[in-house]
Image (cartoon, rainbow, N blue to C red):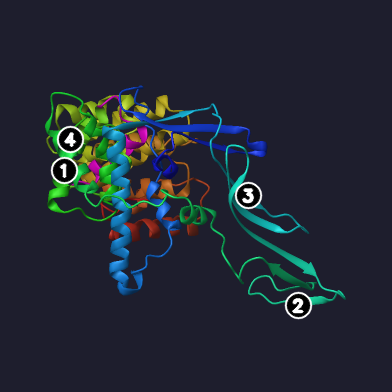
Amino acid sequence: MALLLVPGVKSVTLANGIDCQHETTWKLVPRGSVPNTRLKPIDPEQIFQHYPAEEDADRLGGTRIHEFHQARREQLAAEWNLRLATRQTLVARDVAVAPHTTIVITRSKQDSKPAVERIEVLGQSGRTLFRRSLVEHAVVNSPPYIAFHPSMSNSRFAIGRTKYSTGSRRERFDPIAELIENVEGLRQTPSEDAPRLVKQRLVEALGNVASDSDGLELAVPWIVGLGYQTPSDKDAEIVHRIVADLRVPDVGEALRRIYPKTIPLRYRSILVQRIIAQQTHAEDRTYYASLLSKMPPGTFADMTAEEWQVINDPSLRVDSAAFIERLADLGKPGVQPMLEVLQHAVQTMPKWHQRKPVVQAVCRGLARLGPDANEALPMIGSLFEQRRCPITNSAGDALAWRIAMARMGLTIEELPHPPSWKEPAIAKMRDQVSRRLAKYDPEAGLW
């Protein structure tokens, strides 16, 4: 994609595969001249891996070098995001155009033949304008002999060979680096002001609630640009505004970078709205429900109508199963809804992988309630002792349910087990349950 930014370049056609049959032509066109494709380059800042070392790098300390490279990557990513959100649209066509210039990258390595790495730039007539190559070949010595090749993992005997190369010993050939050094205009310096402009445009778009501003397209890339670290207070406020704005779709993957497991309590209603929103993907619903399930104890003691919608709507509940556990915040009134959800899963989900998240969430919820869930024991016991048990699929599942039943009021001696079990197996099971009960932590789960 960096080639598209070279002055004078109108389009770039990528051809690959045998005989270069698969061709895609990429082009930047004025925004609004075609429908928005929402195409964008993947990690365009990776081009810097191929740049030669900076002349003044030796004068920078290790930390400053890292900061320099990180800032440069952020600047280029911001430039691309700003370009595609405000000025241009990236389009792709499966049609090749007659090239003015052709760049050929060759990597050939076959047994008994020289290994060739090469980059060539050809003019419109096919005339070579630029070429760099690295050719290596291991030639059998004369007279031939058997040599020992020591190695940590693959010591072996082989025919003695001498390696010849057109480059220096252990030279690494980087065709992209060769291209950057020799093609005018390809090496660019991104604007240091780009990240600030992206943030400014994004905040303006979030404030314009009257329309779907183009600047909202900057939201998800901006969150991604924050990395995996805890954001500053000001940035955290912008993240909160982005997640709360349903005009911004598909924020889940980016949000995971900042809040992988837990999230501040003020996101409670926002995450519920995201789960209910039709445009939310199943994976994001599962992630949002997981964050809700880890909010402080008692958070959902007074559930809202929207939260009940997530619980009661089977189409939402199947992707948001983790949230079912928090019915435990209701105390005893939460038992019957959990049993109804479990019964529905058993009756309508024939495959274990379908009902597993629901079954496990109910098990965790009943264990949380402890003695307050005592009324659920008859139904749970009946399901557990069925020959083809619908609520377990492994020994780990059975152990989790026995812990839950013990928390709900069964004594260790009353815990169900197969009639074929001998006394040593029964004693082992009871010991396992006793030890797990002693260190039970609702936040740690049962699996």
Using residue 302 as the reference point, say whether residue 59 is left or right of it. right
Circle nearer the N terminus (3, 1): 3
Q: Secondary structure at mark 3?
A: strand
Residue 293 within the segment the image draws in magenta: yes
Q: State whether residue 255 appears in this view.
A: no
Question: What's under tag 4, amino acid-wise?
Answer: Ala
Circle nearer the N terminus (2, 1): 2
- Mark 2 to mark 3: distance in Å? 32 Å
Q: Nearer the viewer, residue 95 or 9?
A: 9
Task: Say which residue label 4 marks.
Answer: 244
Q: Quadrant of residue 324?
A: top left
Mark 2 or 4, closer to the camera:
2
Task: Say which residue label 1 marks.
Answer: 238
Q: State whether residue 205 appears in this view.
A: yes
CB under 8 Å between discs 4 and 3: no
Q: Secondary structure at mark 1?
A: helix
Mark 4 or 3, closer to the camera:
3
Question: What's under tag 2, amino acid-wise?
Answer: Phe
Categorize mark 2 by other alpha carbons within 10 Å: few (<14), some (14-19), many (20+): few
Circle nearer the N terminus (2, 3): 3
CB under 8 Å between discs 3 and 1: no
